[in-house]
Image (spheres, rainbow, N blue to C red):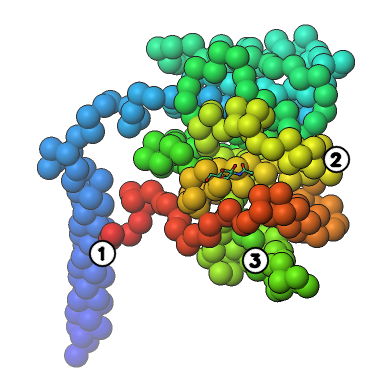
Amino acid sequence: MRGAPHRWRYRHVLWLIGGRIHFMMGICALLAFILLLCHTSSLMGWHRHTKKGNNHERFTVLVNTWRRPDLLKKSVQHYSQCPNVHSIRVVWSESREPPSPLLFTALQASVKKASKKLSYPIKLKIDMHQEDNLNTRFQPLDNLATRAIFSVDDDVLVPCNTLGFAFTVWLSAHDSMVGFVPRMHWLHGKESFNQPVYTYGGWWSVWWTGTYSMVLSKCAIFHKKYLDLYTNHMPAKIRDYVTRKRNCEDIAMSFLVANLTKAPPIWVKGKIFEIGSSGISSLSGHSEHRSSCLNAFVDMYGHMPLVSSNFKAMDARSTWIW
Ligand SMILES: *[C@@H]1O[C@H](CO)[C@@H](O)[C@H](O)[C@H]1NC(C)=O
């Protein structure tokens, strides 16, 4: 009887060790399973055709900036490190105040640094424009070497892998606008004369309904032909309206593309980072102004060209099971 507590303690210790061994084995099995999962594709002989990246085509980053040298520096530094970037073009809308030599040197230094890791140099060019006009961001550019343009504001950063994925989406639909910031036009009701009235749907309405009909050009990929169409072929009264209201160049571009393709844009899943403090969209009355633009453009087109969609493109590697 006196030995019983000892025996019990002995068994207890054994059980403890046994328990830990089982636990450790469990962990090992789990790790092995994860490793196996990670390497399944190579074990099965499923290798990608190219070593790095999916394709050889590249795109041009078109950065729209306005008196924010710090943001521009960050933006150029970031995008010069993304794969598939051919060149970076900066839309500089104030020719009376050209970029300072200091800024220019800093931008060139980051592009040069990024190019060292590549087999090709990334080109950087600052395009000066006469006036501060929202239409200038869509001015056709000389020596644009790629079909695809990634149009982005200086305060928007898209992670390189997300951007690369969006580019592959664009490659399979190169007449579409492919972007990360979806918006919607909602049929509001009927005015007199049976004219439909539209309201602009911001982020919340898109999130709630999963429906959109535009992606904003502050962060979107599209074909370079749309620059020429916007500047030289779209009715001048639309550009005049944008100039006068200092707003809605992105809605005008969405109308242009939708009218030509008769198709919705493509919303790509992905987190983007807005590093600036505030833009037009944080001013009060923003959504009324945007709704006025919608209705004005519908008037000018004679119909509503925007097509709504519920399609969201996402990376198949990041989805669970299928
Ligand atoms: C819209 O597209 C049609 C062709 O489908 C074209 O005739 C018309 O001029 C376009 N409208 C505008 C305002 O560009």
Q: Which residue is mark 3?
A: 186
**Mark 3 / mark 1, whichever is N-terminal:** 1
Asked where in the image residue 127 lies, by quadrant, the reply is top right
Q: Which residue is mark 2?
A: 244
Q: Is residue 223 visible?
A: yes
Q: Is residue 278 visible?
A: no
User: Which numbered mark, 2 or 1, is in the foreground of this view?
Assistant: 2
Amino acid tagged 2: Arg
**Picture coordinates of residue 44, whole percent (x, y):** 12, 42
Amino acid tagged 3: Trp
Amino acid tagged 1: Phe
Asked if residue 83 is positioned above or below residue 161 in the image, the reply reads above
Secondary structure of residue under mark 1: helix
What residue sits 50% from the left and 32% below the top?
223
Q: Which residue is mark 1?
A: 23
**Picture coordinates of residue 174, whole percent (x, y):** 43, 37
